[in-house]
Image (cartoon, helix red, strand yellow):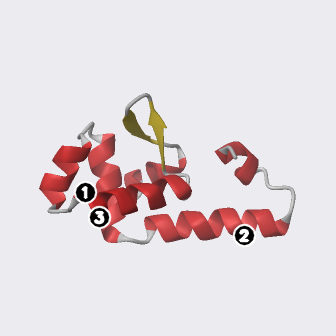
Amino acid sequence: MTVEKWINAATLKEAEEYHRRYNYAITNATRRKILRLIDEGKSEEEVMKILSLTRKQLNYHLKVLEWGFCIEKVGKEWVVTKEGRIIDKI
């Protein structure tokens, strides 16, 4: 499901689900740091090193960020979505 579909949710229940997922993704300090690093063009390996994360930990956070509409995979790289731009506000 695309981000636009969630933003233009047809029902209150869909809108609540979008916000629940988004809030869960961005309320974690580590995930906000990951967003900043991805936005700076850092690779997964660089993010792991900078934040002292294991592969398993990083994969978990990336999955949550994607699930929360904050990042998406373009080719082999992660990119921050418009929703993920919360990093510009904090």
Query: Residue at 80% of width from left, 55% of height from top?
Result: 9
Q: Do the residues bearing badges 2 and 3 touch, measured as CB atoms within 8 Å?
A: no
Q: Residues within 10 Å of mark 2 (few under 14, many from 20)?
A: few
Of residue 7 and residue 57, the one placed in the foreground of this image is 57
Dot 2 corresponds to which residue? 16
| CA gap, disc 1 and disc 2 | 31 Å
Q: Residues within 10 Å of mark 1 (few under 14, many from 20)?
A: few
Task: Answer whether residue 89 is visible to the viewer in this image.
Answer: yes
Q: Residues within 10 Å of mark 3 (few under 14, many from 20)?
A: few
Dot 1 corresponds to which residue? 55
Residue 12 placement, left or right of 80: right
Considering only order in the chain, which callout, 2 or 1, is on the residue closer to the N terminus? 2
- Name the residue type under label 2: Glu
Q: Which mark is residue 57?
A: 3
Percent position of residue 30, x then y: 30, 66
Q: In the orientation shown, which residue stands out farthest toward the right?
A: 10
Q: Do the residues bearing badges 1 and 2 touch, measured as CB atoms within 8 Å?
A: no
Task: Answer whether residue 90 is visible to the viewer in this image.
Answer: no
- Name the residue type under label 1: Arg
Query: Residue at 21% of width from left, 61% of height from top?
Result: 54
Q: How many marks?
A: 3
